[in-house]
Image (tube, coloured by chain):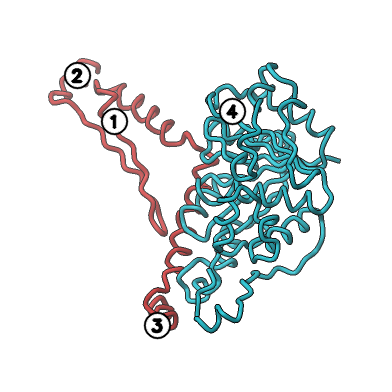
Chain colours: A cyan, B red
């Protein structure tokens, strides 16, 4: 049974695209057949984060409008044979997406993949509502910061009312993924803690991705962080989150950087 | 309590403030979500009732909801043109 999972947040810049790429790659590394779909029409970036920006020929809008077949628009990852990308259009605007068009593509993707990860644009308008429309599950990416938590709450309300599942009286299974978490700052009371966020959002936790330089380093070179540096703290956190999505029970820990001897001697900060 | 937390966490323990502000805000926003058109509805009905007796400029009817920690207030500001008593007398 294919699963449609939307990666959403309301707020921009919290790590939706990074998380879509990392979770998609992690699921593919675990043997699942995965497609990541970029819904950010006009501002596509998932292709860039995955290092496939020069291989885009057709996109989601071309398929919606019947200009290209789905198989022509899908791009297979060069490193992981189980991972595919359906890019967004860079030249069109979000009004080119229609409910029926998206519904048709999702139904088609369900027959070809185990996981369909929909990377939502920021905001609560058409692109974001269509990205979540056909979702069975949702990952709500949240930073430990007031505006992000507020927007996540709003998005949770929309997942419970505006999705096909909600309209049928069914549930969209929701998970909170906390990104850019700094356990030191949280311990000092400078940052909302995991418990604070979970209590406010009343939604189960999928994972905690620590603030890390490895995330930028991976996007710089166009590789999901789980592939670029599998031993890094964020990579391990994303793999744990992917395993939880597959139904495994894994103890929740905040992975920390493994400091080398030189780092310790020089007192370098692990960030 | 807050002072104690600040003392324990150093001067930068701002997370409890964030948590409290979010809890108050979201309690309000979740309530509004179930009736997003409440203010528009109130405004339209208040305008209709007052217009039965006074000729009003619809632009001059302002309805605001102010959120408080324990109670919220509804503020209704209606600008009435001078000499409205006459129009009431005529209408009556």
User: Is the Cβ of the residue at disc 1 closer than 8 Å to that at disc 2?
Assistant: no
Pointer 2: what residue?
Answer: B87
Distance of label 1 from label 2 (alpha carbons): 18 Å
Label 4: chain letter: A
In the picture, which quadrant includes the N terminus of chain A?
A: top right
Pointer 3: what residue?
Answer: B7
- Closer to the chain start, of discs 3 and 1, is 3
* Element class at badge 4: loop
Q: Do tags 1 and 4 sit on the same chain?
A: no
Near-viewer residue (A9 or A72): A72
Q: Which mark is nearer the camera, 1 or 4? A: 4
- Which residue corresponds to the image point at 51% horizontal and 39% vertical from the top-left? A123
Label 2: chain letter: B
- Closer to the chain start, of discs 1 and 2, is 1
* Element class at badge 2: helix
Residue A49: x %, y % from top left: 60, 45
Distance of label 3 from label 1 (alpha carbons): 48 Å
Q: Which mark is residue A89?
A: 4
Label 1: chain letter: B
Residue A119: x %, y % from top left: 63, 41
Near-viewer residue (B40 or A13): A13
């Amino acid at each position: 049974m294919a699963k449609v999972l939307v990666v959403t947040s309301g707020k921009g810049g919290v790590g939706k695209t990074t998380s879509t790429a990392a979770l998609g790659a992690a699921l593919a590394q675990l043997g699942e057949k995965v497609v990541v779909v970029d819904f950010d029409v006009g501002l596509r970036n998932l292709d860039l984060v995955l290092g496939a920006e020069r291989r885009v020929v057709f996109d989601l809008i071309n398929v919606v409008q019947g200009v290209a077949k789905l198989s022509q628009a899908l791009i297979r990852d060069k490193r992981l044979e189980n991972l595919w990308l359906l890019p967004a259009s860079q030249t069109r605007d979000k009004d080119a997406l229609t409910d029926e068009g998206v519904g048709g593509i999702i139904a088609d993707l369900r027959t070809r993949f185990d996981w369909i990860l929909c990377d939502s644009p920021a905001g609560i308008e058409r692109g974001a509502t269509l990205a979540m429309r056909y979702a069975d599950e949702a990952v709500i990416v949240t930073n430990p910061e007031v505006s992000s938590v507020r927007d996540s709450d709003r998005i949770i309300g929309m997942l419970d009312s505006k999705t096909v599942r909600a309209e049928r009286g069914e549930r969209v299974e929701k998970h909170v993924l906390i990104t850019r978490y700094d356990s030191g700052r949280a311990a000092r009371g400078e940052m909302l803690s995991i418990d604070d966020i979970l209590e406010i959002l009343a939604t189960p936790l999928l994972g905690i991705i620590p603030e890390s330089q490895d995330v930028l380093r991976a996007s710089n070179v166009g590789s999901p962080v789980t592939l670029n540096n599998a031993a890094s703290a964020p990579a391990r956190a994303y793999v744990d989150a992917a395993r939880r999505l597959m139904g495994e029970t894994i103890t929740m820990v905040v992975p920390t950087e493994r400091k080398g001897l030189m780092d310790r001697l020089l007192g370098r900060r692990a960030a | 309590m807050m002072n104690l937390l600040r003392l324990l966490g150093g001067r930068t323990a701002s997370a409890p403030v964030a948590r409290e502000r979010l809890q108050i805000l979201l309690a309000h926003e979740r309530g509004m979500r179930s009736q997003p058109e409440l203010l528009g509805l109130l405004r339209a009905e208040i305008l209709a009732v007052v217009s039965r007796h006074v000729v009003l400029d619809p632009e001059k009817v302002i309805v605001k909801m102010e959120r408080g920690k324990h109670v919220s207030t509804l503020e209704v500001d209606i600008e009435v043109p001078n000499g409205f008593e006459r129009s009431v007398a005529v209408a009556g």
